[in-house]
Amino acid sequence: MKRFLFATSLLAGALSTGAAPAQQSRAGDWTIEKRTQDTHCNASRGYKDKDDEDRDYVIVITYSDKAIVIVMIYDGWEWDKIGEILRADVGTDDADIMKKAKWEVMDKTTVRGIFEYDQSIMDRLSKAKRPALDFEDDEDDSIEMQIPRAGEALAALKFCEENRK
């Protein structure tokens, strides 16, 4: 749960923690929230994967009319250089989203992608069950995450964003 809160704080651009959400709801096992210190709403989901040594996985998605931000946390990663820019193809179980997208290393287990807003990306994510990052020259760190009910979560995120204060 600590990683879950940490991921959402990354979206605000600061590593502060402990603030209570101003608005919060659920969509399946996703948390949709607008925290007081954040400008935009975010959707987050964390889980343990029993098929991967019970490792923690967290995904956080937020957007505005200018950008889509996706944060992925995986406790199997051991990135060395905070701030390093990695390149990865982004796809889902049934569609390619973008080639050689830029991902910034936030800490040893966290990467963040900031992309120009494109409705087709949101549409593909809403239909996805397993988004994937395929890092260039690094098969060991490539990853798929489970995002069941992503369509519901992104609809709730849109509602939050349209009604944020």
Image (spheres, helix red, strand yellow):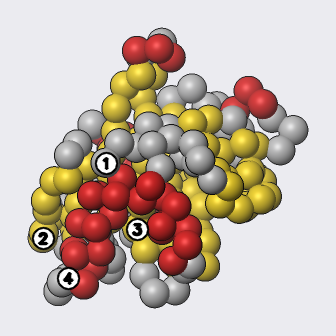
Q: Does residue 56 lie above or below 31 as drawn? A: above
Circle on res. 164: 4
Q: Residue furthest right?
A: 137
Circle on res. 22: 2
Say whether disc 1 or disc 3 marks the residue closer to the N-terminus. 3
Q: CA distance from mark 1 to mark 3?
A: 16 Å
> Which residue is tagged 1?
149
Q: CA distance from mark 4 to mark 1?
A: 22 Å
Crowding near pointer 4: few (<14 within 10 Å), some, many (20+)? Answer: some
Under mark 2, the amino acid is Ala
Query: On the rendered image, what quadrant is the N terminus found in?
Result: top left
Q: CA distance from mark 4 to mark 2?
A: 9 Å
Crowding near pointer 2: few (<14 within 10 Å), some, many (20+)? Answer: few
Could you tell me if the residues under marks 2 and 1 are in contact, i.e. CB atoms within 8 Å? Answer: no
| Badge 1 element | loop
Under mark 1, the amino acid is Arg
Residue 144 percent coordinates (x, y): 57, 36
Question: In which quadrant of the rendered view does residue 158 lie?
Answer: bottom left
Under mark 4, the amino acid is Arg
Q: CA distance from mark 2 to mark 3?
A: 16 Å
Could you tell me if the residues under marks 4 and 2 are in contact, i.e. CB atoms within 8 Å? Answer: no
